[in-house]
Amino acid sequence: MKEVIIKTASAVLVGSLFLAVSSGHAKEGGDQYANGAENWFAGAAPRPGNYFINYLGNYSGKLKDGNGNNAIVADKTPTVNAVFNALRFLKVTEQTLWGGNWGWHVIVPVVNQKIDFVPQGGKAGKTGLGDITINPFILSWHSPEWHTVVGLDINLPSGAYDMNDLRKSIGVNYTSIEPVFAVSYLGSNGWEVSGKFMYNIKTKNNATDYQSGDEFHMDYLVGKHIGNWGVGVSGYYLKQVNDDKQNGATVAAAPGVWSEGRRGQVFSIGPSVKYKTQGGTVFIGQWQHETKVENRFGGEKVWLKLIMPL
């Protein structure tokens, strides 16, 4: 049987959603990083110390084809709903390199994911550990108004993966490397403009001989600090820069499902609210609406973020 594969994109912090059109082998999914996770202070690493950061959210979406329309598979559009809770530990040290403070972090996500996909029997889901992210090399610099961070995230294939029923996969079965550059402007007048810029380079999924294309993506925020509060708009942008390939060949188009090469893209925007306590704990709430979506899931993302000094 000829293998036909649907590329997907996940809302969860690490780990992706997976689909297969036929009963043959299926491919890995898209995002090991939850786009939009970093907005307020994205480039302003905290002072040396230990920090706990928690990301709790929900994503729901429908699969979009190469023209941005709902993809139709077996007369129905595949849908996804995912609840995620990612636990992050960040260490910023007093040690400096090239004038910047050295730090490291680890992110451990737990995911509850449900997919409705007719060819594999309709609705099914999985709860468990997603793909873990580590970064042994974070450097941060500060001036009165400008703050920058560089790093190298490494996303590990620790999440569950089932190539025979990929509705039950919450890992991608490959490692990816991601250089990171983030910058924040924190003006004396209370305005903040922050951006986090990333380039994701994926290894091959050896179970399916599928190579997903590299992606440029960024998180952004424009906001105003008002006392302990902050209000603004935030979101993300992602663009796949080269084609998906399987068995060394560019993935062919499937009209109404995906375009040739299955290059994904998405842009999102929505409101964000921040509150900082006197003790330095930060609470962030945000909603992000996805638009301009091609060859991946598109929908709504709502989440709460906690930043706590230890």
Image (tube, helix red, strand yellow):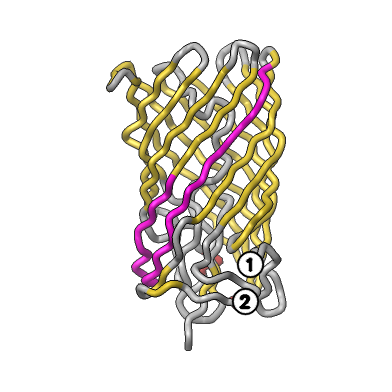
Identify the residue position indicated by label 2 in the image.
255
Residue type at the position of mark 2: Pro
Q: Which residues are magenta?
A: 199-225
Residue nearest the observer in this picture, 239 or 29: 239
Judged from the image, the secondary structure of the residue bearing numbered disc 1 is loop
Residue type at the position of mark 1: Asp
- The structure residue drawn at horizontal position 59% and vertical position 26%, both measured from the top left corner, is 193
- Classify 286 as above or below 212: above
Q: Which quadrant of the figure has residue 80? A: bottom right
Indicate the position of residue 150 as horizontal and vertical percent values.
Answer: 39, 31
Identify the residue position indicated by label 1 in the image.
65
Judged from the image, the secondary structure of the residue bearing numbered disc 2 is loop
Magenta-highlighted stretch: main secondary structure? strand
- The structure residue drawn at horizontal position 49% and vertical position 11%, both measured from the top left corner, is 144
Q: CA distance from mark 2 to mark 1?
A: 8 Å
Is residue 146 highlighted in magenta? no
